[in-house]
Amino acid sequence: AWKWQVLSLFSLCGWGWVSGQIRYSVVEESEVGTVVGNVAKDLGLKVEELSGRRLRLGSEESLRYFAVRLESGALVVSEQLDRERLCGAAASCVLSVQVVTENPLELFRLEVEILDLNDNSPSFPTAHRTLRISESATAAARFPLESAQDPDVGTNAVSSYRLSPNPHFSLDVKQLKDGKLFPELVLERTLDREEHPELQLVLTAVDGGSPALSGTAQITILVLDSNDNAPSFDRTVYKVRVPENTPTGALLLQLNASDPDEGPNGEVQYSFGVHTPDSVRGLFALDPRSGEVRVSGALDFEESPFYEIHVRARDDKGSPAMEGHCHLRVELIDINDNSPEIVLTSLSSPVQEDAIPGTVIALIGVKDSDSGDNGQVHLQIAKDLPFKLVSSFKEHFSLVTDGPLDREKASEYNITVRATDSGSPQRSTQKTIFLRIADVNDNAPNFSSPSYTAHIQENSLPGTFVFSVSASDPDEGSNAKLSYSMLDNGLQDLPISTYFQIDQDNGTIYTIQALDFEQDKVFQVPVEVKDSGSPALSSTAVVHVFVMDQNDNAPTIVYPSVPKGSAFHQAIPALAEPGYLVTKIVAVDADSGHNAWLSYHLEESVETLPFRIEHRSGEIRVARTLQESEAPYRLVVEVRDNGMPSLSASVAIVISLEENMQDFAESMDLPKSSPKDPNITLYLIISLVSLSLVSCVTFGIVGARCLRAGSGSSWTLMGCCQGTARKPTTHFRGQLKPDGFIKYLDVGGAGLTSQAQQYTSCFSPMSDQSDFLFVKPFSHSSTAETMVAYEQATSTLASPCDGQAQPNTDWRFSQTQRPGTSGSQNGEEGGAWPNNQFDTEMLQAMILASANEAADGNATLGAGTGTMGLSARYGPQFTLQHVPDYRQNVYIPGSTATLTNAAGKRDAKNASSAGGNKKKSNKKEKK
């Protein structure tokens, strides 16, 4: 029964094939691995794309018997094929193969015909049969024989019969409508029991294969006395039509056979003929006495639309028994007893939410075992879904998208597919397809704020928590998996990653190294959050990290600059009056704010000496009349800042009186002067002339080289100017005016503090003094800010540099050069802070550069030498509110002059300074 079902299924599937369908053939019993055909070549597919497109077989039957080699595209046998088992006695054995590819999703149908192999010999159901034939049998009487059975078909099936030679019988072979051969014995000459009571015949069946195979049966003929009338049916062929749902036990018809003999020779018994298969015997029952044919099993039109039954009537009690034969054909009427079947061939789930309309989601096949209208199936889905069904070919559909998908609105669909046939009554079935919508990375992560502010103390340990940023992403899965990173903003000399690190999972920012407020006061940390989608989307935010100052820098004494453990020696007139300026202590502090407020103190052990120190300015002045007997005086000055805890620095100063200088020289064991040589004047004149000539030649060569190295009015001192043993500058450049005088000099380099210095000097061509202005301290972390400050300072100094400056005998600043103009000084401790940040930074730069000169020992400390030493007690970024003016701290070493806004006091101090200098010069002349 299953063989007929397979044949019916193939015939139904074949109705939808087009004329150009691919068909292969393969011989049964072929070895596993036998190539049936090249699917890729015949379907027009490229072999290198098979793996990517996931070429595979679609149906279970295809996967059972065949396989596809992706490396060559060949369809091969995966299990030995037995045609007789697959198709039975069907004339044609064709298997349908479904081939599925993805990307895009496609379905192909192939046919593979299983060719018969002559692997079975004919055989008879009964190897030895006995026939009882009455001697009264007339010539030409026929006696049916059993047909040989051969599972092979076509030419390999039974093609002929032959009978062993004998004098009484011949063999006649008839062909039935189904093509089978039916052998019969034909009596050629009457039998004579007395002459031959028994005959032995051999029946041989031969198939048409090459080589031909055969089978034999032994036939024994027993000659009986005559029962000369055989039963006969009223019709040779009977035909009946019944519905396939006819119940068991229903009467189909009653056969009627008659025997004119009387007595036992006329009693007829009905039975199935030898040609009736066992499968039919199980569906129908034949009453041996009445000849009634009834249904004994479930009939199925889809399994077989008709049945052929061979019936014989035999008078078993006759001697010899005789029999008659008839043919019964039972045809079934199809009933709509099968619901449609939905087969999901392939499903692409999940589907991307950005799939374009028309994207194939699934391949669906339907089948109905009924025939006619009962087998016509219609497929449909709900109309409110963004999907539709497209008919690929008969009984095969594609589920495609019919509109845009949005995972945020619907992340999954339950699509109910309903199949309905056209029978009466209609039968239907449904199948639910669960489809998930895959997320597409179409949403970028967002920070809760575009910028954040964080504060951290300087010198915090590496790994200190700074800030934690957070972002969200409406996508899901890897598209919503966020990772945080830092970007380099280029504002610092070193990458921002050398200062901070961020936890890529939670956005927490930590320090990598201790931060220095004096080097970097604020960091702009660009933070990027990126999802893990493809392509990845990202957004950025900025974290402003403000470094809070700590008192981690002790004051640095820049003047006087003496080696550690040594004392600074200062000589003053012995007749100096109270208030006389002995010297000035210049100190700086790299901290800012209150941490940079400096105060100057004398150690308690020296408070009894005739000197006092101004706590704010650091000026050491004579407090009372000096006594030569007490000289030299030894002072220890301590500079303290205002931090918590307070840090300090100290310097020792030895003050001697000018009258004691000769005694001091003798204490140094200097060599005594030799007697005056009368020719010493001549020798000195010759030496001076020689040195002058050599100097002039040297300066001329150096000047020529410098002029050749320049172009136009600009020239560079880098190649011709040599630095001192301590080279603090990293660049040194100057510019000439058209008249040949130096317009300005720009110097940048490292100073005594952690910050580098940059300053500009403007020279006056008619003065032996210079207006020397130091611009903002140069920091490696603020190059851009330094350039801005440099341009501002240059524009500020445009007028003094371009014009001819007057002699600056009192070291007063012009209005444009003065660090600040707010307030006025009342007494030595009065004053006001600069009124803007630029003035403060400019003044701080002036002080630091002056400290460098004093530390190098290369500049002559005093007025009128072309350079000047300046100092201030406040550092960069210092709060300028409610703090006294410390511009009075600008001090000219070797002079009593100070910088102040009070004109009267400034002039008075200048006069005092001039008087002191004159007095000192007179004493030198006397000496």
Image: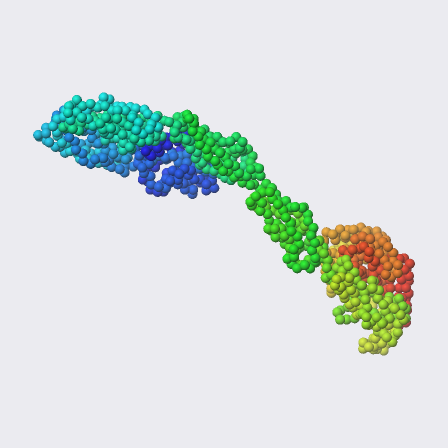
Is the residue 637 above or below the residue 360 in the image?
A: below
Residue 787: x, y in percent? 74, 52
Q: How many marks?
A: 0
- Quarter that holds the N terminus: top left
Residue at x 88% of width, y 68% of height:
623
Residue 841: x, y in percent? 78, 55
Answer yes or no: is residue 379 visible: yes
Instruction: Indicate the colouring scheme.
Output: rainbow
The image quarter containing residue 896 is bottom right
Residue 907: x, y in percent? 90, 60
Answer yes or no: is residue 174 visible: no
Residue at x 18% of width, y 35% of height:
128
- Quarter that holds the C terminus: bottom right
Residue at x 86% of width, y 64% of height:
895
The image quarter containing residue 570 is bottom right
Q: Is residue 419 left or right of 694 when viewed as pictured? A: left
Front residue of 769/290: it is 290
Q: Is residue 301 left or right of 919 when viewed as pictured? A: left
Front residue of 209/114: it is 114
Residue 564: x, y in percent? 75, 69
Residue at x 83% of width, y 59% of height:
886
Is the residue 229 above or below the residue 679 in the image?
A: above
